[in-house]
Image (tube, rainbow, N blue to C red):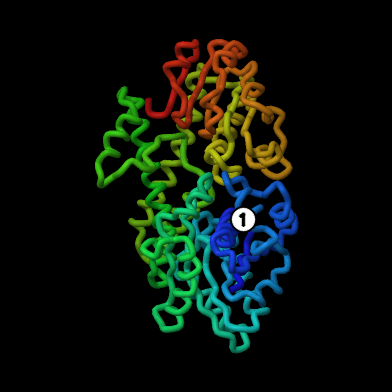
Amino acid sequence: MKICCIGAGYVGGPTMAMIALKAPHIQVTVVDMNAARIAAWNSDTLPIYEPGLDEVVKLRRGKNLHFSTAVKETIQAADIIFVAVNTPTKTYGVGAGRAADLRFIESVARTIAEVADGSKIIVEKSTIPVKTAETIKDILAANTRGAKFQVLSNPEFLAEGTAVADLIQPDRVLIGGERTPEGDAAVQKLVEVYANWVPREKIITTNLWSSELSKLVANAFLAQRISSINSISALCEATGADVDEVANAIGKDSRIGPKFLKASVGFGGSCFQKDILNLAYLCEKFGLPEVSAYWESVVKMNDWQKERFASRVVSALYNSVADKKIAVLGFAFKKDTNDTRESAAIAVCRSLLGEQAKVVVYDPKVPASEIVHDVLGAGGANARLSVARSAYEAAAGAHAIVVVTEWDEFKTLDFAKIYDGMVKPAFVFDGRNILDLGKLRALGFRAQGIGK
């Protein structure tokens, strides 16, 4: 069997590497038009950081795992084609700011239709709106020369930072297809790929539309939990309750459970906001404005939490951070990844810069150029923004430390040393609740967490 994956990003690269590792009899090729990205996958420095991914790629690369820019040739040779291209939120036209931009999905469908010379199984791996398969099938049917295609939905449920572990032992693998003999046969073929390492009882099969919608709804439910506990964090601060204690208490209820009840400065990443907005747009499109408004409120709560956090910093520093140095520790949207998409750090940095603060950022995995680009935009410049090479460098001479990403190294910093080098009074604002506030206060810091 030969598998082609179109798209060498956070989904396509790790997923195909795991298939190659667990099914060495399958030839897996990841293709992308971005030559620099493909070159990075073929180098010793992969374009994305995931714990354990380097080892998996090096074990199979050059054997049954390949990375190439030969898109058309690889499509022609493949039996199964995974589509893992980006589906960002539209920034123009109908649905701007909410609907998914499917231009890359359509482009891939047209490329497959142009070059495929036989029957293929097309697998949607990208996060897409329900009914996208109809678009793909329509384009294929209108442009091919008698070739037969089956379109399947196989959404990813990976969490960045634990993608390799999620792939090795997934909670479930979801495969949706048409309820026809041809569709059932295509679904079974993909089931057999995953069955090389995933127990059959964890492989769920559904119709196409259920599978497509399940991805959006799963992310929406997870994000809704974060926004819910973040809303309670504000109440905890106002009443003297501790949000971690509240979360622990309600998380013991088996109907609720403890996951995604960690209060923070706000959620980020490529999926949650994009998928909730897309879900809200779909609800409105199908004549359900009340449902749409409900899900949009989850995103509004997340935006409010970021603004509230930055405002607390300004308020604590005597209502002005102008010309004060603020050390922002962490820029990735979560630990163990270099992904900065929708990171809370972007909003926090912009808010502090808007208050005329001198912002110094440190992140162990995000390049300085990306930090500057994300905060200021392409070609942007602001002398008040700089990037440090260590947490100690960032904190030297600072009035306050702001923890925005929960990197493990921040828990083991020598805060006594850091305190000695800061302007007094020295403040710490823990946006992830990973530090011992009591110990920090004993050192002399004025330390605050979320919901405490």
Q: Nearer the viewer, residue 47 or 208?
A: 47
Say if 393 sits above or below 193 in the image: above
Quadrant of the image occupied by residue 451: top left
Q: Picture coordinates of residue 134 (x, y %)?
A: 49, 75
Q: Picture coordinates of residue 430 (x, y %)?
A: 48, 26
Task: Name the outermost residue toward the bottom.
Answer: 146
Query: Residue sitting at 50 percent across and 52 percent down?
Result: 271
Residue 215 horizontal side relative to residue 376, left or right: left
Residue 395 horizontal side relative to residue 216, left or right: right
Q: Picture coordinates of residue 110 (x, y %)?
A: 63, 75
Residue 90 horizontal side relative to residue 192, left or right: right
Say if 197 sits above or below 251 in the image: below
Quadrant of the image occupied by residue 57: bottom right
Q: Nearer the viewer, residue 234 or 287?
A: 234
Is residue 276 visible from the viewing direction of this image? yes
Name the secondary structure under disc 1: loop
Is residue 92 visible from the viewing direction of this image? no
Quadrant of the image occupied by residue 328: top right
Query: Residue sitting at 62 percent across and 66 percent down?
Result: 28
Counting the numbered discs, the total is: 1
Q: Picture coordinates of residue 234 (x, y %)?
A: 37, 31
Q: The residue under label 1 is which amino acid type?
A: Gly
Say if 238 sits above or below 216 in the image: above
- Label 1: which residue? 9
Which quarter of the rendering shows the N terminus?
bottom right
Query: Residue sitting at 43 percent across and 70 percent down?
Result: 176
Query: Residue sitting at 61 percent across and 83 percent down?
Result: 118
